[in-house]
């Protein structure tokens, strides 16, 4: 049977190389245009993620939330690390802070313009988390923890999750915001708002995970 599977796999590979699907090639552009027009945003991917398959995106947010809760749960019984490994030389500190600034600006750009160009809430949140991680490897853990508590980041993370599901439920029930002018910053109805909320949630969740690993493992 192995030879049958191997022959079938080779024939399928040759078919894809020699006989491309011309019908699909002609339909791809049309499908993307239809999705973009229905969602009211130029970025068809954002339209799919935050409109056509909003149910799936809601579960993705839930999975990320459970992952952060899992990190807290698994590390809760460990003893805090006595030593934190980080960069202390001036060049590394300057480069890390510069990289953090650039990553934060990119995250903001991806969040507020993710419906117009490639980007979106998850990518923006990852960029924000990267910025926080770069700051963490050159800063005092006590200072990072104090900033986290000062801004009530843990509470804001939970609130962002609740707001996301509230707005997602409204969208799924048919309560739509005005689409606005196609291709402008304030367009796409709920999509723009959901992008920003997801970015905030992912960035704050990444911050929490970073602090936990620093506190209990001494490194990122």
Image: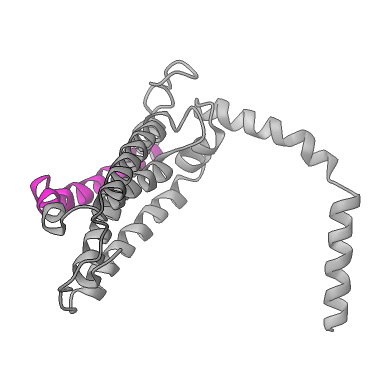
Image: magenta residue range: 146-172
Residue 159, magenta (yes or no): yes
Q: Looking at this rendering, what residue extends furthest in the bottom direction?
A: 1
Decide if residue 71 is on the left or right side of residue 7.
left
Q: Based on the displayed image, in which of its 4 quarters is residue 27 positioned?
A: top right
Decide if residue 8 is on the left or right side of residue 80.
right
Q: Does the rendering let one see residue 61?
A: yes
Residue plotted at (28% across, 54% down): 205
Residue 153, magenta (yes or no): yes
Residue in front for this viewpoint, 29 or 103: 103
- Is residue 196 placed above or below 84 in the rendered structure? above
* Residue 62, x across and y down, in percent: 35, 57
- Is residue 63 placed above or below 25 in the rendered structure? below
Residue in front for this viewpoint, 134 or 212: 134
Decide if residue 200 is on the left or right side of residue 5.
left
Here the colouring is one colour
Residue plotted at (63% across, 28% down): 33
Q: In which quarter of the image is the C terminus?
A: bottom left
Residue plotted at (15% across, 55% down): 140
Residue plotted at (84% across, 75% down): 6
Q: Quadrant of the N terminus?
A: bottom right
- Is residue 72 placed above or below 55 in the rendered structure? below
Residue in front for this viewpoint, 103 or 6: 103
* Helix, strand or loop: magenta stretch: helix
């Amino acid at each position: 049977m192995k030879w049958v599977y191997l022959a079938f796999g080779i024939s399928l590979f040759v078919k894809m190389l020699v006989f491309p699907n011309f019908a699909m090639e002609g339909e791809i552009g049309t499908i993307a245009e239809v999705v973009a027009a229905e969602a009211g945003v130029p970025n068809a991917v954002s339209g799919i993620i935050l409109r056509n398959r909003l149910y799936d995106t809601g579960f993705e947010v839930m999975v990320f939330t459970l992952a952060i809760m899992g990190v807290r749960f698994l590390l809760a019984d460990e003893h805090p690390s006595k030593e934190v490994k980080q960069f202390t030389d001036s060049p590394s500190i300057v480069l890390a802070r510069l990289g953090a600034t650039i990553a934060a600006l990119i995250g903001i750009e991806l969040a507020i313009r993710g419906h117009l160009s490639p980007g979106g809430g998850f990518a923006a949140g990852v960029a924000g988390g990267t910025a926080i991680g770069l700051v963490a490897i050159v800063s005092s853990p006590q200072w990072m923890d104090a900033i986290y508590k000062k801004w009530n980041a843990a509470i804001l993370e939970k609130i962002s999750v609740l707001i996301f599901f509230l707005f997602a439920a409204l969208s799924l029930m048919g309560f739509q915001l005005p689409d606005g002018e196609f291709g402008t910053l304030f367009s796409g109805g709920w999509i723009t708002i959901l992008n920003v909320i997801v970015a905030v949630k992912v960035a704050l969740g990444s911050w929490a995970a970073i602090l936990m690993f620093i506190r209990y493992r001494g490194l990122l």
